[in-house]
Amino acid sequence: SALVAPEAIFALKLSMVTSFWATVFNVIFGLFAAYVLSRYDFWGRNAVIVTISLPTAIPTAVAGFALLLLWGPNALLGRLLNTQGVQLMFTPYAIILANIFVTFPLAFGVIKPVLDTMSRSMEEASATIGATRWQTFWYVTLPSLRGAIVGGALLTFARAVGEFGSTILVSGSLAERTQTAPLYIFAKFNEGQIEAANAIAIVLALLSFVIFSVLFFARDWLEFDSQDA
């Protein structure tokens, strides 16, 4: 009964939806950033890599506080949005933004090492037979990255579903509005409703187990698939 409560179902759905969109964004832009930083050498390249990796070292509460200072109602960017009638903080969009910021290094960190070690002979061969840079990327490079992309996406999604520190600051943890599953667990625990907190905690634990089981048991298949491509 605790698991099918309206608040619990809403919290689970919100976590899944916001984590999904954060994963989509991070995989697309993580792939783009990894490709540029792996294939091109330019001034400030190392600084960009450090900046991208920085969220892994910053406490998530600090990340959430920084986003609040930047996009909050009284912040510069927040006021600009308010003039357009847009409120970002304390909405599901703020949760997606926080998840993107916190989990971006994961997809990037999985994809870039594969690109760094990938032989460029197939890409060079593709160019010599007249393929454009986009065709080479789409038909040669991208298929070889399928394993890394799937792995990065699963890791990003698993991390985003369990994000707490940043989301509690930018969302406000409003029941049935901006309360994700981890925030629901925290709220119910503080209210003394241990059964309700346990119900959602078990679901998240099982979800994490399934995701990492897929990563572990499908690792050989993903690597073979990428090499075969």
Image (cartoon, rainbow, N blue to C red):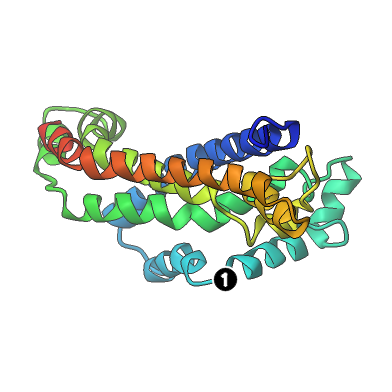
Q: Quadrant of residue 78?
A: bottom right
How packed is label 1: few (under 14 Cα within 10 Å), some, or many (20 or more)?
A: few
SS at badge 1: loop
Q: Nearer the viewer, residue 79 or 226?
A: 226
What's the residue at 79%, 43% (across, down)? 175
Residue 33 position in % (x across, y down) = 40, 51
In the picture, the quarter occupied by the N terminus is: top right
Q: Nearer the viewer, residue 2 or 122?
A: 2
Residue type indicated by callout 1: Pro
Residue 164 position in % (x across, y down) = 62, 57
In the picture, the quarter occupied by the C terminus is: top left
Residue 107 position in % (x across, y down) = 39, 49
Q: Nearer the viewer, residue 40 or 178?
A: 178
Residue 216 in the figure: left or right of residue 152: left
What's the residue at 22%, 55% (across, down)? 116
Residue 134 position in % (x across, y down) = 31, 32
Q: Quadrant of residue 166?
A: bottom right
Placement of 42 over or under 129, stated as above or below: below
Residue, disc 1 = 59
Residue 199 in the figure: left or right of residue 108: right
Placement of 159 over or under 65, stated as above or below: above
Placement of 153 over or under 69, stated as above or below: above
What's the residue at 56%, 48% (across, down)? 201
Residue 151 in the figure: left or right of residue 95: left
